[in-house]
Image (spheres, grey):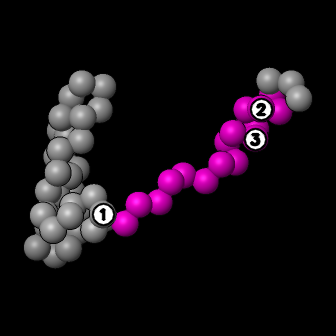
Amino acid sequence: MDDSDKTAQSAQIAPRSIDSAALFTGGNELIIIHNGSPYRLRITRQDKLILTK
């Protein structure tokens, strides 16, 4: 298998799926650190998700 085959194969892997209840564990917001910067993920009153830096 050459490098182009490996790239095509890795592009076909499905992303992970995580239930939001498992992330929030009873709360309504959490902090995600990405490249050293904090991002706030929260559930709104309308049950939508908002991600802010």
Q: What type is the residue that disc 2 sits on?
A: Lys
Q: Residue furthest right?
A: 1
In the picture of the structure, the residue carrying the numbered disc 2 is 6
Marks 2 and 3, Cα distance to the nearest angstrom?
A: 5 Å
In the picture of the structure, the residue carrying the numbered disc 1 is 22
Q: Position of residue 34 (x, y in %)?
A: 29, 32
**Dividing the image into 4 quarters, which one contains the N terminus?**
top right
Q: What type is the residue that disc 1 sits on?
A: Ala
Q: Which sits in the foreground, 32 or 53? A: 32
Residue at (28% x, 68% y) in the render: 21
Q: Position of residue 36 (x, y in %)?
A: 24, 24
Q: To which quarter of the image does residue 29 belong?
A: bottom left
Whether residue 8 is in magenta: the answer is yes
Badge 2 marks a residue whose secondary structure is helix
Q: Which sits in the foreground, 52 or 33? A: 33
Whether residue 30 is in magenta: the answer is no
Marks 1 and 2, Cα distance to the nearest angstrom?
A: 32 Å
In the picture of the structure, the residue carrying the numbered disc 3 is 9
In this rendering, position of residue 5 left or right of residue 49? right
**Dividing the image into 4 quarters, which one contains the C terminus?**
top left
